[in-house]
Amino acid sequence: MAGELTVSIDAMGGDAGPAVVVSALVRSIQRHPAVKYILHGDETVLNQLLAKRKSKFAGRVSVRHAASRVAMDDKPSFALRRRRDSSLWHAIESVKSGEAECVVSAGNTGALMAMGMFQLGVINGISRPAIASVWPTQRGQVVVLDCGANIECDAELLVDFAIMGEALARAVFGLPRPRVGLVNVGSEEMKGHDAVKGAAQILRQSNLPMEFCGFIEGNNITEGVVDVAVMDGFTGNVVLKTLEGTAKLIAFFLKGSLKRSFLSRLGAILASGALLALRRKLDPRAYGGGLMLGLNGIVVKAHGGTDAIGFAYALDTAIEMVLGGVNNSIVADRAGVKPEAVAS
């Protein structure tokens, strides 16, 4: 059960809007009886939705009016300049003021990152924030970062990603020494560009609470060889989209095969339990969306097209990150990296 904390929510973000957020709150309140929630958005719409379940939300949910919302196609620079009366801006502002410990939004990713950096700032010692994601593997789960926030990265930035990733893995997975690997074109030490080679050298010399596994290849990520897979944002975004597409392709082929004949349909009925377990394992809603690590506050981005189940999982992840002290771990671990190692 979660401790006493407050979650700030951009209730107008995402494709489905506030109805999904309110439905997700029903699930989240059941899982976390001590947590409180602040909804930012159109107070008339939100109060109407909350009134339908008034008894469930009494004393747990409050509404703050916001005059506008950030559109999914708004450019981050435009949103930062012209949308300071939006639900997204006010949701982040609640974390900045200390009124809430974390913020969750299904809205515009670029605007969320830009507003988060502007209002919250970056953790001392971290060069730039990164977008992390949690994926299923053959052995459990893996933290992958960066998933698109930083297209070009030097060695120091990759080290920052490793630190943020292992801090998240310890907080959410409960691992005392997460296994960390740098994604490369081969596992041999001589392969790769200067950034990954430099990062590997720094991590080998550090005394961080992780097991550094050196270089890994793309197929090792889903094999579960490591708990944290580190890469630049260009690579991470391509890998993320490829895996999402592969999951859809598998589902498409499986559905077609099971409907091909009477015996196939009968086999599907007999294997319904196993198929349901597979569906749950591959369901992207269960993996918390995008986690914006490195900001002076916990910021979680739910998938833009998510439903109530997915948004509830994003709320779970934000709460777990707060209770696990992710940011405190990042600060402590970054301070443990020798400055001369980074400079070299």
Image (cartoon, rainbow, N blue to C red):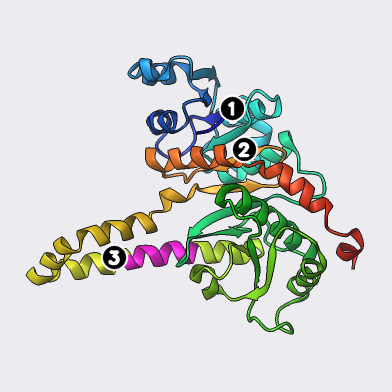
The residue labelled by disc 2 is: 322
Residue 36 % position (x, y): 53, 24
Residue 82 % position (x, y): 65, 31
Residue 98: which numbered mark, if any?
none
Relative height, residue 260 to residue 329 (above, below)? below
Residue 131 % position (x, y): 62, 52
| Total residue callouts | 3
Relative height, residue 280 to residue 76 (above, below)? below
Q: Residue furthest right?
A: 340
Residue that appears at 55% across and 54% down: 133
Q: CA distance from mark 2 to mark 3?
A: 37 Å
Q: Are marks 2 and 1 in contact (CB under 8 Å)?
A: yes
The stretch of residues the image draws in magenta is 241-250
Circle 2: element type: helix
Residue that appears at 72% across and 46% down: 329
The residue labelled by disc 1 is: 5
Residue 252: which numbered mark, if any?
3
Give whichever of 225, 188 is nearer the camera.
225
Q: Quadrant of the C terminus?
A: bottom right
